[in-house]
Image (tube, helix red, strand yellow):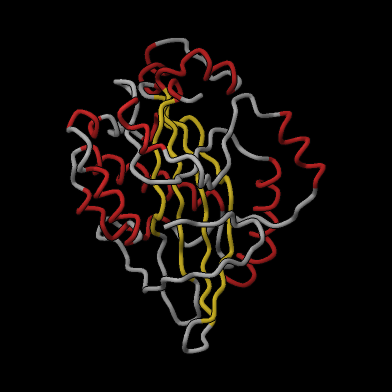
């Protein structure tokens, strides 16, 4: 499934289906989220100044990392989806846009109890559940947490991975999460054949996981420094997860958060 950049608030949906709750407590995704809206050019200048590491565009249609599967290093995580986002750092521009959409659209019209903290708490739990299911080759156990097309694509690409490659997706503890942020929010509206306006919210989340961080904090004088210095020093231990969550808010539909994009990569392998 190829998605266009969602900064303009409305994108047609060509495939709609009821969203089901996960047997692994998909409701833990929490019923809320952020978004993206204005287009103020001067924010772009600020954004460029804070990018310590090059960030590729959100929905890259020209880079198909699956084509380079045979050239991957021994430690490089396999790419499970085509054209997945490749996000490292927050975007000031998209962050401000997202907060505006949360305040102006999501909370007043979709979910007045939505909070970013609750959403991110549920998103981190979902990331760990899905990643660990992938690591043991058991995608079926999280099928209801994934959008159908995403599930099919991931399942197909997992067939090309060895058990050793899949094992690299394993995550041990939420205490190893160093940083999590909503990168972009999209509002999707579409009139279906019955004339009912379907409404969806999508949130792209970036999660930095420092493997072994919890033990370092317990057993040494390790200090959390500025992200740039800390990541440069320990980049070989850091895994970055880009997940996109979607929930239906159509009137009369009890939607749940599910995932339609899954992408993991090692900081050390990022160019």
Indicate the position of residue 13 as horizontal and vertical percent values: 49, 70
Q: Residue furthest bottom?
A: 194
The front one of 264 and 108 is 264
**Tally of numbered discs:** 0
Q: For the point 34% across and 59% down, which residue is it?
A: 149
In screen coordinates, is 269 left or right of 72? right
Q: Residue furthest right?
A: 42
Would you place residue 219 above or below residue 46 in this image? above
Indicate the position of residue 95 as horizontal and vertical percent values: 66, 46
> Which image quadrant for residue 37?
bottom right
Indicate the position of residue 21 as horizontal and vertical percent values: 32, 65
The front one of 240 and 103 is 240
Q: For the point 37% across and 12% down, which residue is it?
A: 219
Would you place residue 1 above or below residue 164 in this image? below
**Which of the image's four quarters has the N terminus?**
bottom left
In screen coordinates, is 187 left or right of 167? right
In screen coordinates, is 92 left or right of 226? right
Indicate the position of residue 162 as horizontal and vertical percent values: 18, 33
Q: For the point 34% across and 25% down, which residue is it?
A: 71
Would you place residue 164 above or below residue 17 in this image? above
Q: For the point 36% across and 69% down, which residue is it?
A: 19
Q: Residue furthest top?
A: 221
């Amino acid at each position: 499934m190829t998605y266009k950049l969602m900064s303009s608030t409305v994108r047609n949906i060509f495939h709609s289906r009821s969203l089901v709750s996960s047997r692994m407590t998909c409701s833990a995704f929490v019923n809320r989220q952020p978004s993206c809206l204005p287009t103020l050019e001067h924010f772009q200048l600020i954004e460029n100044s804070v990018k310590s590491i090059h960030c590729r565009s959100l929905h890259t249609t020209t880079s198909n990392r699956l084509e380079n599967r045979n050239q991957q290093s021994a430690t490089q995580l396999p790419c499970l989806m085509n054209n997945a986002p490749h996000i490292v750092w927050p975007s000031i521009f998209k962050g401000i846009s997202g907060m505006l959409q949360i305040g102006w659209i999501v909370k007043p019209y979709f979910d007045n109890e939505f909070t970013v903290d609750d959403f991110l708490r549920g998103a981190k739990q979902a990331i760990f559940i899905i990643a660990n299911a992938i690591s043991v080759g058991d995608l079926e156990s999280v099928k209801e947490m994934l959008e159908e097309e995403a599930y099919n694509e991931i399942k197909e690409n997992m067939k090309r991975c060895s058990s050793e490659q899949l094992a690299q997706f394993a995550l041990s503890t939420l205490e190893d999460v160093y940083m999590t942020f909503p990168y972009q929010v999209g509002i999707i509206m579409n009139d279906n054949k019955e004339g009912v306006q379907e409404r969806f919210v999508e949130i792209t989340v970036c999660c930095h996981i420092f493997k072994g961080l919890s033990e370092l904090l317990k057993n040494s004088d390790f200090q959390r420094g500025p992200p740039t210095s800390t990541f440069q020093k320990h980049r070989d231990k850091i895994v970055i997860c880009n997940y996109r969550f979607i929930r239906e808010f159509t009137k009369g539909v009890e939607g749940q958060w599910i995932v339609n994009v899954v992408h993991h990569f090692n900081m050390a392998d990022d160019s």
